[in-house]
Image (tube, rainbow, N blue to C red):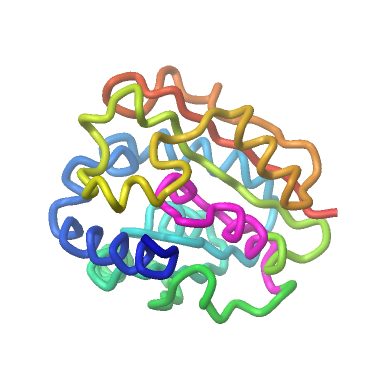
Amino acid sequence: MKPAEAQIEVSNYWTRRAAAFDGVASHVAQAALWRDVLSAAFEAKEAKDVVDLGTGTGACALIAASLGHRVRACDGSEGMLAAARQAATAAGLDVAFEHALIADASFAPGSADIVTLRNVLWTLPDPMAALRKAYLVLRPGGQVLVSDGLWSTAAQYRSTYPETLAASLPRHDGLTEDEARTMLADAGFGPARSWQHLFPASPYPGDVPMFVLTARKG
């Protein structure tokens, strides 16, 4: 399957799952923990410009907005984005949502202090392109925050992509912290810092090995 076709299939898949997604999502079940971890990882003493790539139902975007940051976010799934907008409205949070794939999002180069990608890299046909987009959008000295996990250790909790679609996603089984560090370095970022130790245990069912990393643009 060609990358463009795979991306469309991925977006359509998550639109179909959108209505029920937050009912079992970690960022909802353990909202206070995720807020504490992201607050620490942002290392921000004042309001920052935050861009959330592949926002889904708005996990990182809503937390960032609740912390007082100026937030923009994009996603290719109309259904997931509708859920994110509804959640933002219900919480009284101001987030500028854009319906767009990461590659096509209109965020100007050098317009963000922080870029977040939470549970995004595993489900992309070209995860390195997303990291390069993050690098482009960041100002010098800005930081990317990447969180993901080794989903193959508890596959029953993850996607049910058709086999042909799964095979077209190079990180479909997930990725380790070391692999993510290498990817960040290859995208041009400086040394990564980990934050997952702030969770008392894996926040995902099945004790999935996960990570939260930040790295700065030089």
Q: Residue 94's spot in the image, x, y percent?
A: 43, 72
Image height check: is 170 above or below 13?
above
Image height check: is 8 above or below 186?
below
Q: Residue at x 27, y 25 (%)?
A: 205
Q: Residue furthest right?
A: 218
The answer to whether residue 11 is seen in the rendering is yes
Q: Residue at x 23, y 33 (%)?
A: 157
Q: Residue at x 70, y 62 (%)?
A: 113
Verify whether residue 130 appears in magenta. yes
Q: Residue at x 61, y 32 (%)?
A: 179
The residues colored magenta run: 111-134
Q: Residue 136's spot in the image, x, y percent?
A: 71, 67
Horizontal relation, residue 60 to residue 176: left or right: left
Residue 153, by quadrant, is top left
Residue 98, by quadrant, is bottom left
Horizontal relation, residue 142 to residue 206: left or right: right
- Please identify the quadrant where the N terminus is shown: bottom left
Q: How many marks?
A: 0
Q: Residue 192's spot in the image, x, y percent?
A: 72, 36
The answer to whether residue 47 is seen in the rendering is no
Image height check: is 10 above or below 119?
below
- Please identify the quadrant where the C terminus is shown: bottom right
Verify whether residue 51 appears in magenta. no
Horizontal relation, residue 176 to residue 206: left or right: right
Q: Residue 133's spot in the image, x, y percent?
A: 63, 65
Image height check: is 209 above or below 86?
above
Question: Observer-nearest residue: 94 or 139?
Answer: 139
